[in-house]
Image (cartoon, rainbow, N blue to C red):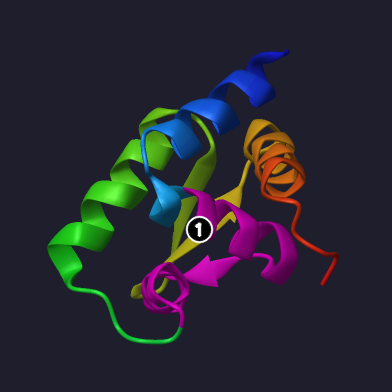
Amino acid sequence: MGEAGRIAAELLAGEKLRHAAVLIYLRHAGPSTEADLRRAMTGGRYLAGRTAYVVLRELLDMGLIEVTRVKRFKIYRITELGRRVAEEVERLLQLPPP
């Protein structure tokens, strides 16, 4: 199991499903705002700012996503490692292609 597989297994074993949801969302949707990612973490509802901040900060610290500022918006993008982790999470959960 490579690094991506190890991280994917840790996310799922640690019940960090919001982390996995963000990675899968970014893999398929592309660059997104924090508001988009808050909704992705909850399946369409709007997640509280503190919880979303913690999830995004952890993903940034793990090198799975990156953020840039465009005017007043933060735009989040998946990194290459994050893409591989998202693919592995999808495989482990046996998710059908979009």
Image quarter where the C terminus lies is bottom right
Q: Magenta stretch: dominant SS?
A: helix
User: What residue sits 52% from the left and 50% below the top?
Assistant: 20
Mark 1 element type: helix
Image height check: is 95 above or below 15? below
Q: Position of residue 53 (x, y in %)?
A: 23, 56
Q: Which residues are magenta?
A: 20-43
Left/right placement of residue 29 relative to residue 40 reads right
Indicate whether residue 26 is drawn in magenta: yes
- Residue 6 lies in the magenta stretch: no
Circle 1 residue: 22
Taking the spot 40% from the left edge, 74% from the top edge, the residue there is: 71
Give the percent coordinates (x, y) of residue 91.
77, 44
The quadrant where residue 41 appears: bottom left
- Callout 1 environment at 10 Å: few (<14), some (14 to 19), or many (20+)? many
Q: Quadrant of residue 18?
A: bottom left
> Mark 1: which amino acid?
Val
**Picture layout, residue 81 above or below residue 3:** below
From the viewer's perspective, tell me whether residue 28 is left or right of residue 45.
Answer: right
